[in-house]
Amino acid sequence: MKLVQHQPLRIAAARLLEATGASPEDARIVADHLVDSNLSGHDSHGVGMLPHYVRAIAAGLLDPKAQAAVEDAGGAILSVDGQNGFGQVVARRGTAAGMARAKATGIALVALRGAFHIGRIGTYAEQAAAEGIASIHFVNVVGHAPMVAPFRGSDARFATNPFCVAVPAAADHPAVVLDFATSLVALGKVRVALNKGEALPEGTLIDSTGQGTTDPAVMYTEPRGAILPFGLHKGYGMAFLCELLAGAFTGGGTVSTVPFEKDRITNNMLSIFIDPAQLPGAGGLEAQVAAAIEHVKASPPADPDLPVLVAGEPELAHRTQRRAVGIPIDATTWDQLVESGHAVGVVFAP
Ligand code: NAD
């Protein structure tokens, strides 16, 4: 493990992205997103994705110069054609447009299709929450081989389809940000376990014959295994609704209609933005949320070392800790980064 400070990592990541053809502004947005994911404790969506992005650009699957336009007919519904551009740039732009419309009308829906990997979804929920806007995001993944088996199935039929909801911060509480893959783990976490040489918990994966396994390699060898959805039939149902809402409703397509290509990761996202200040009950809203948080956190912890948290708190704690001591990066991921940088004259140094 290397401990890497976040500032030099941001600079090296942005330089690498600029060397691939991204504008300085877009390179900075993507680099900051990746490093902030590492800082938040989600290494699966951090700088370890850069070698993949570089390969996808070289293969013509990711267009570093794409300029996604927001399609706006003036109502509550907006859409964005990602044009295979950096997902972090496309989704940030779509989120800004949704927030602005929600501030004007109380609510907005943004249907985003065809962006390359948009990364950690909580980033967009936090972008909205920082300006007092609550948001709900349904995401699917296409163009990539499926990774997740349906409940009762024995092979992969869809992806790790993340779901995210955020309630903005108030005087008495930080933003509540629930953001997770509907699979038991995100695929990036399987990659991180493989790079670290670690097994995954039992009940997370099945191999290509449908049998349970703890070996992350089953997701990276042919014929591939699958990750199981979280929460049995309930998580499966949610994953499938992400497939429908993000895939079918945006026009971006589902795993059943979009062909796979090596190194492609296309995301579609259906987002709802709400301005809580315009809700009829808004007067009491902040106090209600604060009271609910206080109430659940007052539950005596079953293990005294593990207090009750609300969603979003683990990421805040990681940020404080990793800003102070650095971001741990495993040797395989680090070597891949150094190699990607070397190819274009960018130095990654701890
Ligand atoms: P995870 O299992 O670590 O769950 C994270 C969520 O659970 C966060 O909201 C966190 O605040 C909350 N949480 C964690 N511990 C908690 C506790 N003790 N009490 C209360 N809340 C707690 O996340 P994951 O499923 O591994 O997903 C990781 C990231 O991967 C997410 O940011 C997701 O958006 C991203 N992702 C992206 C894609 C994509 O296609 N772009 C696909 C899958 C996942």
Image (spheres, rainbow, N blue to C red):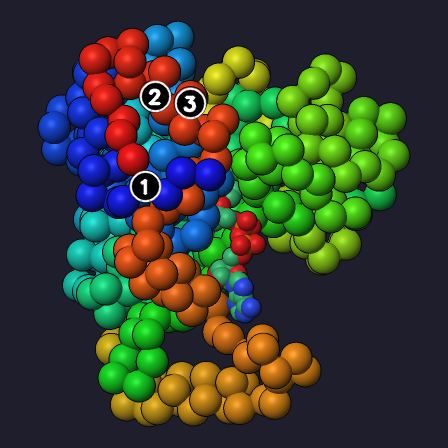
Looking at the picture, which amino acid does disc 2 mark? Val
Q: Which residue is mark 3?
A: 335
Q: Earlier in the sequence, mark 2 or mark 1?
A: 1
User: Going by the image, does 339 lie left or right of 128?
Assistant: right
Circles 2 and 1, Cβ within 8 Å, touching? The answer is no
Of 332 and 273, nearer the camera is: 332
Q: Residues within 10 Å of mark 2 (few under 14, many from 20)?
A: some
Q: Residues within 10 Å of mark 1 (few under 14, many from 20)?
A: some
Secondary structure of residue under mark 1:
strand
Circles 2 and 3, Cβ within 8 Å, touching? The answer is yes
Looking at the picture, which amino acid does disc 1 mark? Val
Label 1 and label 3: CA atoms lie apart by 13 Å
**Which corner quadrant of the image does residue 21 belong to?**
top left
**Which corner quadrant of the image does residue 294 belong to?**
bottom left
Of 173 and 162, nearer the camera is: 173
- Is any atom of residue 11 visible in this view? yes
Q: Which mark is residue 338?
A: 2
Q: Please say if 160 is above or below 147.
A: below
Q: Which residue is mark 1?
A: 4
User: Going by the image, does 335 lie left or right of 28?
Assistant: right
Q: Earlier in the sequence, mark 1 or mark 3?
A: 1
Label 2 and label 3: CA atoms lie apart by 5 Å
Secondary structure of residue under mark 3:
helix
Q: Residue 70: image x %, image y %? A: 22, 37
What residue is drawn where x is 60% and y is 28%? Answer: 255
User: Going by the image, does 262 lie left or right of 301?
Assistant: left
Circles 1 and 3, Cβ within 8 Å, touching? The answer is no
What residue is drawn where x is 36% and y is 16%? Answer: 339
